[in-house]
Image (tube, rainbow, N blue to C red):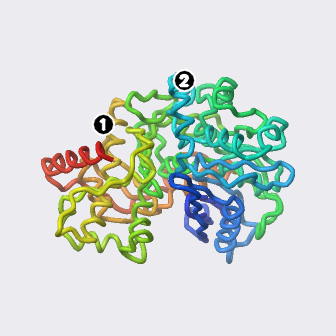
Amino acid sequence: MRHVIAIDQGTTGSTVLVLDEQLAVRGRGYKEFAQIYPTPGWVEHDPEAIWASVTAALALALKGIEPSSIAAIGITNQRETTVLWDRKTGKAVHNAIVWQDRRTADRCAQLEADGKEARVKQLTGLTLDPYFSGTKIGWMLQHVEGLAPRARAGEIAFGTIDSYLLWRLTGGAVHATDVTNASRTLLFDITTLAWSDELLEVIGVPRALLPEVVPSSGTVGTTRGVPGLPDGIAIAGLAGDQQSALFGQACFTPGDAKCTYGTGAFILMNTGELPVASQAGLLTTVAWKLSTGELRYALEGSAFIAGAAVQWLRDGLQFFSTATEIEALALSVPDSGGVIVVPAFAGLGAPHWRPDARGTISGLTRGTTRAHIARATLEGIALQNVDILRAMQRDAGRPLTMLKVDGGAAANNLLMQFQSDVLGVEIVRPALVETTALGAAFLAGLGAGVWKDQDEVRKTWREERRFKPTTDRNAVTEHLARWDAAVSRA
């Protein structure tokens, strides 16, 4: 029996799954790491803490697994999070700047004022926003003493987390990223699939920093010096977390869509072989490229805060001690009592793109309880997605008929039923909700020959539960109107 390792390096922790050829989970490990908030709106990670969390999760997942049975490793990662490190020592020159970080909002606004946004969007499919990697690199080059000349001299390497982990897993032998992660940097032409000299000049990034760009599936390196793993295991899958989840949900047909409920909520729709330019504030991104040459694009809308809002209730307001308790608390009241929570703690993403927006709670009365706020928080997570999917349907020119869901919060039945009600479509939850990791395993297994093609992969995908709309549409319309009003004030 051959096994595939999936490393899912997320915003708050690292998960490692070991799957067999029938996609049974044979090993699992998870390790959290600290979040660093130097000042309001800034979010950082210690790259060494990320690496330590990966090796710790690997050790847990590999218990009882024969190392010689491991056929391949796939990596999926929090995208846009930016690391710069010394090519000789492998040491990061600054904490990683996380995708949620807003410190480059002024830089993005200046580029927009300079008339750069239309061209950036044409080449990258992205909007000028602090979310993406390019301006984060520029910030480090400007604020870390002596870094800019070292970067121009080729002494420094840039990578998103996939690239950083690939470097560490290969003992520094491979500096590469895949097309999906490259497409999230503001530096990559998604039509030519190459780094753009024009964009490098606009953003102010030396080409010497950049990794090689490779397909999402196919061997790019082998392990060397990794604790608990033999040398020579193929690393054969790389993809940003949301593209990986799209692949892991077997959304192989144009029009297929999924929503991942993680720290944020991320909706992607497969648009086929050609990029679809959004007219509604969404992103156009590379969905995957396989070693066979198959190339797919996607439309994407992101809400920066989803599961993180539940963490806020748990840690910040101490409403409960574990995140899973929110469902019982929310169900203790029949509705949210007119309370609307807009969880814009890190600004509003698609289709609004308002980095200055902040979270709000409205509709409070003397009768409001913790339960009402908890229920309204879950509803706010779902209502953000309505805004995104309205825009996505306009851009794609087709109605959404079904949405596949995954991620930790997809296990919350109340949230999934409310999501179905406000969207008016069926919500389909798979047997394995960790489809971000599953996509990395699929990509690696295809790249290493564990599975022969996508049809074989598709047959392994299994549905666990389907949620159908139950609420009167007039009530939904009223709720959406209250939501729209609250968003306008955020």
Task: Name the residue rendered at 68%, 55% in the picture.
Answer: 95
Pointer 1: what residue?
A: 399
Mark 2 crowd level (few <14, some 14–19, many ≥20, 10 Å Cα): few
Residue 455 visible in the displayed image: no
Tell me how many marks there are.
2
The answer for how far apart the CA atoms under marks 1 and 2 are is: 37 Å
x, y percent for residue 54? 67, 64
Q: Viewer-proximal residue, 187 or 486?
A: 486
Asked if residue 212 lies left or right of residue 488, the reply is right
What amino acid is at disc 1? Pro
Residue 353 visible in the displayed image: yes
x, y percent for residue 101? 55, 49
Residue 410 sits in quarter: bottom left
Q: Viewer-proximal residue, 352 or 454?
A: 352
Q: Viewer-proximal residue, 379 or 135?
A: 135
Residue 372 vertical position relative to residue 245 in the rendered view, above or below: below
Residue 331 sits in quarter: bottom left
Q: Which mark is residue 114?
A: 2
x, y percent for residue 358? 39, 50
